[in-house]
Image: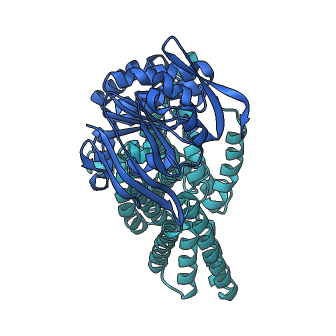
Amino acid sequence: MSIEVEKLCFSYGRREVLRDVSFTARPGELTLVLGPNGVGKSTLFRCILGLLQDWKGSIRVEGADVRTLRVRELARRVAYIPQSHYPTFNYSAFDMVLMGTTRRTSPFVSPGKKEREAAMEAMEAAGAAYLRDRSYHRLSGGEQQLVLIARALAQDTRVLLMDEPAANLDYGNQLRLMEQVRALAERGYLILLNSHNPQHALDYAHRVLAIRDGRTRAFGKPGEVLTPELIRELYGVEVDFLRLEGRCLLSPVRGGAR
Amino acid sequence: MEQLEGRERRARWTIPILGALLIVGFVLSFGLGRYAVPPAEVVRILLHRVFPGGIEVTWEPNMEAAVVNVRMPRLLMACLVGCALSAAGAAYQGVFQNPMASPDVLGASNGACFGAALAIYFNATNQVTVLSAFAVSLLTVTLVYAIGERAPGKKIVNLVLAGIMISSIFSAGTSFIKLVADPTNQLPEITYWLMGSLSGVQWANLRFAVVPIVVSLVPLILLRWRMNVLTLGDDEARTMGVSARKLRLVVVVCASLATAACISVTGMIGWVGLVIPHLCRKLVGCDFRRLLPCSMLAGALFLLCVDDISRNLLSTEIPIGILTAFVGAPFFIYLIMEKER
């Protein structure tokens, strides 16, 4: 019941993006993926989600080789939560969540009563029930993110992949989102989350995967893995780690950005 | 919230109302034309066809001939073509995630025109012209799809670009045929075909078109929920268990088949596939579970009415393709100018 990635390599044409990424993410844990822009975090996700094909190495989800899984079988195991976005056509928030149930029904069938109930339950679990009848286009970024989480829950998988979910959210919504994600992990979900914020890793994550130059640079508990050296290596900036009352705060060193 | 509830109520009633309007419009349209038949007689003649002997014959034989042999196939064809072109348009817009897409994007229309022009140039019979238009139309779409899927990069952009290129090749071909065609009889025939018309539609034409249209509309109706998922983009659809490539192929094949079947019989009838889905999105929203049936009914009703105008406005018939553009384009401008809700 985990994601095992071993020696994952991927190139876009000549350009090598992932050279050697290995890690094992477990259920009940929130794993944050850190790394600078363009390091291949999204590429890693796309490989796991079956959106990219020509990678080398091995990716196993709940014991099954991703390569051998059909589209619907993979969708039964892994759900994807994209950044809040603006789709061409507008749907109600409820219909948006209902789309998460698609993998349960056969291709020629529209969702029925069972699926509608599952969608409603998912909305309640994600705290998005009050958005039910709103139009998706008119929701704020934070509300859209709630709906997308509900949609992933409606897909009824144990694994959730979130690609920079906090990117378009204000400060309060970012924290609310991270609290919610952490709570989901504690309920047993395996969550893999791309983030640009090492502070979130310290505050919420069970594990941290740091990627540099397409390789696993570090993988482990945030308190052990995250160091000023790692931050400098990943992002090229100096930060102080301020420890107080068992917590750790990142504080940029003024003039330390090279 | 109130607005949304109002919208929801309107959406629920739209489809039954459209259905009722279509039936009424269908019966009334029988009576219209050079040879007027009162609506009551129309109903009696139709009932007589269904239950022979049950209705006393009070009409002249001419009336029955006009209703059954001339107007019936034509009205059915108008409804069928309107329904199919609108459904195809809605489907194209969904799979290309672009509200500007129409059945012409992949070159179905320009291909059909070239096929028809070529057949007319070789003095082919009406039937061969229809077949040639149908075949070249499907060939065009296949060509465009093969190019679009092979080219590297974004699939949808490639498909649309390939569609524009191949279309322009075929429309150049059509122009060339017009140039070399015999100006006394072939050229007017080609020109007339390009304008699109339902005049002279016979039972045989209807029988030819109805099979591919029904065969292609049924899968579209069945797949209408999956099309919703596909409009979110290939990647998201795939992570929700919908194989975007396969679904798009099925939808494009069905929508193109329906379009080719329509255009090959009636000639170029534009705008229906673009305008009607837009109008329906305003009425019932973007959800294909409602949008598709609504578009089909509204498209049938629209073309039925436009055909009535084309038959009755002037003493000579106006080709329907011209009217759909005259009615469709301004209406479309109104739709895009009107603020959302």
Q: Colour of chain A?
A: blue
Nearest to the observer: residue A233 or residue A70: A233
Counting labels gives: 0
Farthest residue in the right direction? A255
Q: Position of residue A96 (x, y in %)?
A: 45, 32
- Residue B32 horizontal/vertical position (percent): 55, 50
> Vertical placement of B183 versus A79: above or below?
below
Seen as rendered, the residue at the extreme front is: A229
Camera-nearest residue between B306 and B275: B275
Counting from the top left corner in percent of width and height, residue A224 is at 44, 29
Is A224 placed above or below B193 here? above
Q: In which quarter of the image is the N terminus of chain B?
A: top right
Q: How is the image coloured?
A: by chain
| Residue A77 quadrant | top left
Horizontal placement of B1 versus A121: left or right?
right
Which chain is tinted cyan?
B
Q: Which residue is drawn at 49% across and 22% down?
A: A203
User: In percent of the image, x 58 and y 37: which residue is there?
Assistant: A86
Asked if residue B13 can be seen in this view, the reply is no
* Residue A179 horizontal/vertical position (percent): 47, 19
Residue B231 is at least partly visible in this image: yes
**Residue at the spot x=39%, y=20% of the render?**
A183
Q: In which quarter of the image is the C terminus of chain B?
A: top right
